[in-house]
Image (spheres, rainbow, N blue to C red):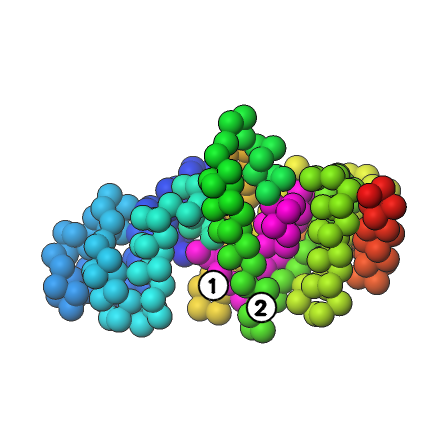
Amino acid sequence: MADKDDSRYRSPQEFYGDELARRRNKAGMTQAQLGEQCVISPQMIAHFEAGRRRPRPDDAKRLDQILGTDGFFHRWRKSMDEGRYPDHFAAAAELEALAQVLRLYSASLIPGILQTPAYARAVFVAGAANYEPEEIERSVANRMERAAVLKNPGAEVWALLDESAIRRPVGGSAVMAEQLRHIIALARRGRIRLHVLPFSVGAHALLESMIVLKQFEDAPPVAYVEGLKTGRIIDNPATVDDCNAAYDLALGDALSMTASLALLEQVAKEFERDK
């Protein structure tokens, strides 16, 4: 990813442009050379890279063909049109699907790719004063689609959960029991590496924010942090290194995977008794 000032929000369109510039430079091409092969003016390539304009879908396909990016720019361009995700999350969702390693941490919520449909539905309903059921179901479907990364044998997923995330009864006891059983099954099948930060730890290095750390085969790592109705991709190398160091510190305070699974089993049984 381009080395930008990570203190400001960048739209999916700007992030698209940054990635296009990075891939073009990696291919050893100037804007003029790329434009000539794509039959697009160098000025338009510059607009794409600055985030001022979006390529047409056919142009995005040609960018993929020339840069050898396996449909990356066309898929991302399509997702911006479809608006499946909020603007602050669209770029992060695309990168999530491409990552080889995902390291997740959440303080009060089960991370999106680990959620069951019932849990996700409860989250979306709670966040809307007025809502259309059809819109809620579209949001749930989009979230479930993201979980496809867990079926990718080449993806390595770490889930570091605060104890509050596994005890908060989102959707009620039955929903939470199902949710915890789902996470337990993923861990036992080897699809995720699970650790829990228990209440007894007190303060820890990730207390202030949720975070997702993403590593790629052919691109520098990034971090994604999110708050209410906002999110930010961090690609400044020094800051990403600091985020990874904080994750490692918190992981050192967490329960072992065996103890974490035992705690989830215990809490799941408590919710099942409450049903």
Q: Which mark is residue 98?
A: 1
Using the rendered image of the protein, determine whether residue 207 is visible from the camera's viewpoint.
no
Q: Residue at x 59, y 54 (%)?
A: 113
Tell me the quadrant of the picture where the N terminus can be found.
bottom left
Which amino acid lies under the numbered mark 1 shown in the image of this protein?
Leu
Closer-to-camera residue (218/181): 181
Residue 187, image x, y percentages: 73, 64
Q: Quadrant of residue 184?
A: bottom right
Closer-to-camera residue (187/14): 187
Which amino acid lies under the numbered mark 2 shown in the image of this protein?
Lys
**Mark 1 crowd level (few <14, some 14–19, many ≥20, 10 Å Cα):** some
Q: Residue at x 42, y 38 (%)?
A: 9
Q: Earlier in the sequence, mark 2 or mark 1?
A: 1
**Mark 2 crowd level (few <14, some 14–19, many ≥20, 10 Å Cα):** few
Closer-to-camera residue (213/147): 147
Q: Which mark is residue 249?
A: none
| Image: magenta residue range | 94-120
Helix, strand or loop at label 2? It is helix
Q: Which residue is mark 2?
A: 151
| Depicted 120 relative to depicted 185: above or below | above
Residue 125, image x, y percentages: 58, 35
Residue 221, image x, y percentages: 51, 59
In the picture, measured across the screen, residue 17 lies left or right of residue 224, that is left
Question: Could you tell me how far apart the alpha carbons at marks 2 and 1 are, in whole angstroms?
Answer: 13 Å
Tell me the quadrant of the picture where the C terminus can be found.
top right
Residue 198, image x, y percentages: 82, 46
